[in-house]
């Protein structure tokens, strides 16, 4: 078990970098051009605030989630996984407080008929759409949950909700997991999955959408240890982003002010990233106390507590919750990895992604598709595919193929040339340095493994 100690994140400095507004458009264009993210249902004119992840994006998003799972579950002995249902009955959301507290304050402009979140207006008296002043209605609470019907008959008895967070599935399964996993506090339940929020003002590409993926941990601890575990997870989650390539200068920890805290939280801090429009939340780490377990125990009539046989203590564990957005993390990794370089008067665009996140680890590039070179390249590809996700590209000049792989973040390219037929060697090119090494095919897998260091 990992103890609740960790290196402190780098402190904020007065000389923080400026947001790069031009970078946003570059990333959006790259995502469309290289098959990372598409607007959903584009052939029908699109569907606002919904996105589809293309061949490159689907693999990148999977790698982000796998990297999180590796860090939070695979590399720890005190965390287990869960995959809970997306649909939930009203009782769950009544107990959690979502039916009464999960809302945004909305105002309508009586002039242009647009709707806005009151708490996000630059000027609470001026409509940002039409510019008129004094035209807003009184603010009304708008619940963000998606409601639907289960079964063939509509009515109150068939009402269900799409979950607005993955957390509640872990709380309602606390007793099941405690009894079947043989864990005891401190221990955690981790989950990666879809959540749905009927945001009134989605925007900034995949940063704020109505359908998104979360990576959440509920870490159950003895009440007396809650604060030290809260501090541990703050530092640990900050460091995860740094280890995967985001510069510390583009990250910060921001504690919530008292008026920002959720009704259940005694302390919350956000890991924030410097997006092109300014600082935005990547992940929240909250000390939720025993609110959730007590609420579900009260509403369900089930005891949700832990009995320590060694000490004879019986208590309701407190919960520390690191909750990250997978799609927001993907966007931050793309922004942090993007760079442009001039090489021999040619502009080179590079995604310097960490090898663990790169959609393809290796690209196999034969100089010709004709035999016997094509067959040899197929042999090389077959050697690599059991170990890594690989791309295979045999079209256009080799320089253009290198540039394509640079743009999607492939760390290593393996070029099969005409000399390879005789000497049984290939050329391995590094994405970041563009250095090339001649490597025997017989030892290629070992060579690539040492370079990727996954």
Image: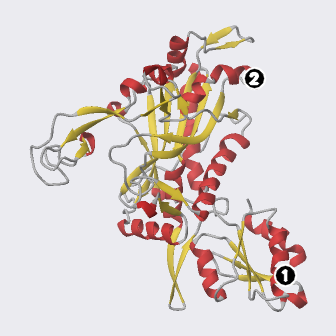
Specify the quadrant of the image occupied by residue 76. top right
Quarter of the image for the C terminus: give it: bottom right
User: In the rendered view, does 135 fall on the left or right side of 358?
Assistant: left
Nearer-the-camera pick, 197 or 252 = 197
Q: Which mark is residue 226?
A: none
Where residue 303 appears, x then y in whole percent? 61, 11
Mark 2 and mark 1 lie on one chain; the one further toward the N terminus is 2
State whether residue 339 appears in this view. Answer: yes
Nearer-the-camera pick, 445 or 133 = 133
Q: Which mark is residue 375?
A: 1
Where residue 173 appears, x then y in whole percent? 63, 24
Q: How many marks?
A: 2
Q: In the image, is residue 109 above or below residue 179?
A: below
User: In the rendered view, does 396 fall on the left or right side of 162?
Assistant: right
Q: In the image, is residue 432 above or below residue 85?
A: below
Q: Which mark is residue 180?
A: 2
Q: In the image, is residue 434 above or below residue 93?
A: below
Specify the quadrant of the image occupied by residue 35. bottom right
Nearer-the-camera pick, 158 or 122 = 158
Q: Residues within 10 Å of mark 1 (few under 14, many from 20)?
A: few
């Amino acid at each position: 078990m990992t103890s609740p100690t960790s290196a402190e994140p780098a402190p904020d400095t007065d000389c923080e970098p400026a947001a790069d507004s031009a970078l946003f458009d570059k990333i959006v264009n790259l995502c469309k051009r290289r098959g990372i993210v598409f607007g959903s249902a584009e052939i029908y004119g699109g569907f606002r605030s919904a996105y589809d992840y293309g061949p490159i994006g689907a693999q990148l998003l999977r790698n982000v989630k796998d990297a999180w799972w590796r860090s939070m579950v695979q590399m720890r002995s005190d965390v287990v996984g869960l995959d809970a249902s997306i649909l939930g009955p009203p009782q769950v959301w009544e107990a959690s407080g979502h039916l009464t507290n999960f809302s945004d304050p909305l105002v309508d402009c009586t002039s242009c008929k647009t709707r806005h979140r009151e708490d996000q207006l630059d000027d609470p008296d001026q409509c940002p759409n039409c510019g008129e002043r004094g035209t807003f209605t009184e603010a009304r609470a708008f619940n963000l949950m998606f409601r639907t019907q289960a079964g063939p008959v509509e009515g109150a008895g068939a009402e269900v909700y799409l979950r607005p967070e993955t957390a509640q599935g872990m709380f309602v399964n606390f007793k099941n997991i405690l009894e079947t996993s043989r864990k005891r506090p401190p221990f955690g339940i981790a989950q990666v999955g879809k959540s749905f929020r009927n945001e009134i003002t989605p925007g900034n590409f995949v940063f704020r959408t109505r359908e998104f993926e979360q990576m959440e941990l509920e870490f159950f601890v003895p009440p007396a240890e809650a604060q030290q575990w809260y501090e541990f997870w703050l530092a640990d989650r900050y460091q995860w982003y740094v280890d995967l390539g985001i510069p510390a200068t583009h990250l910060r920890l921001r504690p919530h002010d008292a008026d920002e805290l959720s009704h259940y939280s005694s302390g919350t801090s956000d890991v924030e990233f410097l997006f092109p429009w300014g600082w935005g939340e990547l992940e929240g780490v909250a000390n939720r106390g025993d609110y959730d377990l007590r609420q579900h125990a009260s509403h369900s009539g089930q005891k949700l507590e832990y009995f320590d046989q060694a000490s004879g203590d019986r208590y309701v564990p407190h919960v520390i919750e690191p909750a990250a957005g997978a799609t927001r993390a993907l966007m931050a990794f793309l922004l942090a990895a993007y760079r442009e370089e001039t090489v021999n008067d040619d502009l080179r665009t590079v995604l310097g992604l960490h090898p663990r996140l790169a959609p393809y680890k290796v690209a196999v590039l034969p100089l010709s598709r004709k035999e016997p070179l094509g067959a040899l390249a197929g042999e090389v590809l077959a050697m690599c595919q059991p170990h890594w996700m690989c791309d295979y590209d045999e079209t256009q000049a080799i320089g253009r193929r290198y540039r394509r792989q640079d743009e999607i973040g492939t760390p290593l390219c393996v070029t099969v040339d005409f000399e390879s037929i005789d000497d049984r060697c290939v050329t391995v090119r590094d994405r970041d340095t563009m250095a090339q090494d001649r490597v025997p095919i017989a030892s290629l897998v070992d060579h690539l493994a040492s370079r990727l260091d996954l």
